[in-house]
Amino acid sequence: MSDAKSDSMIRIFDTTLRDGEQAPGCSMTLTEKLRVAQALAELKVDIIEAGFPAASPGDFESVKEIAEHNFGPVICGLARCNPADIEKVYEAVKGAENHRIHVFVATSAIHREHKLKMAKEEIIKSAVGAITMARELVDDVEFSPEDASRTELAYLAEVVSAAIEAGAGTVNIPDTVGYTVPAEFDRLFRYLKDHVERIDDVILSVHCHNDLGMAVANSLAAVNAGARQIECTINGIGERAGNCSLEEAVMAIKTRSEFFGLQTGIDTTRLYPTSRLVSNITGMHPPRNKAIVGENAFAHEAGIHQHGMLQHASTYEIMRPEDVGLSKSNLVLGKHSGRHAFRDRIVELGFELDDFETNRAFQEFKKLADKKKDIYDGDLEAIIMNASAATSGPWTLHSLEVQTHTDQPATAAVTLLNENGAEKSDGAYGDGPIAAAFHALEKVTGVELTLRNFELHSASIGEDAQGEVTVTVEHDGRSYRGRGASVDIVEAGCRACLEVMNRILRRKRHSGPGKPTAEQATI
């Protein structure tokens, strides 16, 4: 292809907003998706797969909005091989200066026989027709043979050849169910390179799932065998066990450059801030020992390790914390810090807030600074997420009082403020303080919820660290997720619960009936 990058460049295709969001509990609001898209642009990913526009009206609108913001990367939408899907993608992405249509169809025997009930020839015809139609709408078309890693090699080569002839500029080879292993995947890519004419005219891509814990290893094996695009997600989120982790793949290529002889265009100093943003939005926090962005990734406790680090960092560190955007000391602000220092730090952390959100966050920062001596980056991130959620009522938490006694029900009294500043209070009993507080919120707002999951995560270090609470609840058959933070974990839980209640009330006020259930796609 005339516009292909040099052979040493690896394109990073981020599918956090499509495949990542399909993970249970990871759905995002439009505002949250825009924040993630902005962060991905600052990270300098090459392509953002913004969603699956045909899945639902909400998916269509979010992809369209992201495209029209023109953040910089190519904006891509996913489509099945049918005209309606392809038209939806085009209408959604056409507002971006650089846009792509990504079409897919399953090719493995198990999918042909049990899902599609189509013959080999029919599948090729479907793929060619979809690519041809997409090429009439856009210049940049990607094709994926779903479940490629379990497809017969000769047939896969036939499908890929037909896709190239039809005009696909990128051909993606997915390990859809995380079944392959590195040596086997290496052989698959080398087979295609040897048996498909004109394969050097397209960009070969790789898309791996992590069911056996080998998504990154398989992706790197494909790269070593000739793939020049990696499809991945922030923190490796995605369906089932997740996808190839962007930060791990990128840092492997950078750290082992003498082995791979390759590079990406990623600004690696944005990896940690982007990871934190996505984990805060989705409520899925990386394990402490997660490579690259986990809390322990650059921590050394063993005495022999600490001694070596003091002598020379390279004894036990193959990367510098600064390379991934993690400062050696993230102690940044105190009670005497001003608005300018506060704004500068939240920008460094990768957040873009308007004046109203900044003022609200600064007020919360001052309140927190009166409660704890030292404010860490994690505290700031929790404040920002809280402030962002609180900017759109109709209810805000004014006061909370909780009493607990051994062998007696807990009691809670809450006072909320409505949009006009009027107070409304009520109280309730519960098996514990959380249950009592939630029941009191239900009585004030009139929104009844069923709590399915309650997660508590420390935002920073120390006995006075803020607690970040993520709740998953059900209302009218739909699942919702909310977040809240406070040095008081009951208050954090109330803020998380109230965020969901506000969302439900706004939806009832503005949107009417819920959106149709989306048919999710996986490649």
Image (spheres, grey):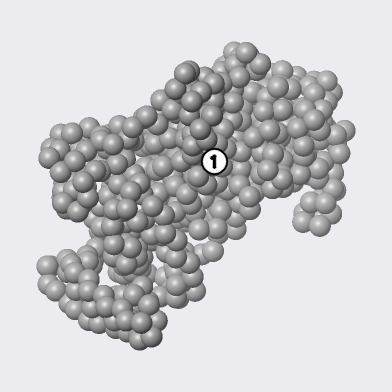
Query: Where does the image place residue 117, in percent across and percent down from the top left?
Result: 81, 55
Q: Residue 10 lies in what quarter of the image? A: top right
Q: Is residue 346 visible?
A: yes
Horizontal arrangement in the rendering, residue 51 relative to residue 182 (left or right): left
Badge 1 density bin: few <14, some 14–19, many ≥20, Cα 10 Å = some
Q: Quadrant of the C terminus?
A: top right
Q: Is residue 356 above or below residue 414?
A: above
Query: Where does the image place residue 304, in percent across and percent down from the top left?
Result: 54, 29
Q: Residue 376 lies in what quarter of the image? A: top left
Amino acid type assigned to the residue bearing label 1 in the image:
Lys
The residue lying toward the viewer, choosing from 111 and 349, is 349
Q: Residue at x 52, y 35 (%)?
A: 302
Horizontal arrangement in the rendering, residue 273 relative to residue 386 (left or right): right
Q: Is residue 486 above or below residue 422?
A: above
Horizontal arrangement in the rendering, residue 374 relative to residue 131 (left or right): left
Query: Where does the image place residue 221, in percent across and percent down from the top left?
Result: 71, 28
The residue lying toward the viewer, choosing from 299 and 237, is 299
Most extreme residue toward the bottom is 408
Q: Residue at x 58, y 48 (%)?
A: 238
The residue lying toward the viewer, choosing from 107 and 411, is 411
Which residue is under mark 1?
A: 290
Q: Is residue 471 above or below residue 402?
A: above
Q: Residue at x 64, y 23 (%)?
A: 228
Q: Residue 395 lies in what quarter of the image? A: bottom left
Q: Residue at x 77, y 28 (%)?
A: 186
Q: Is residue 510 visible?
A: no
Query: Where does the image place residue 46, in percent across and percent down from the top left?
Result: 50, 27
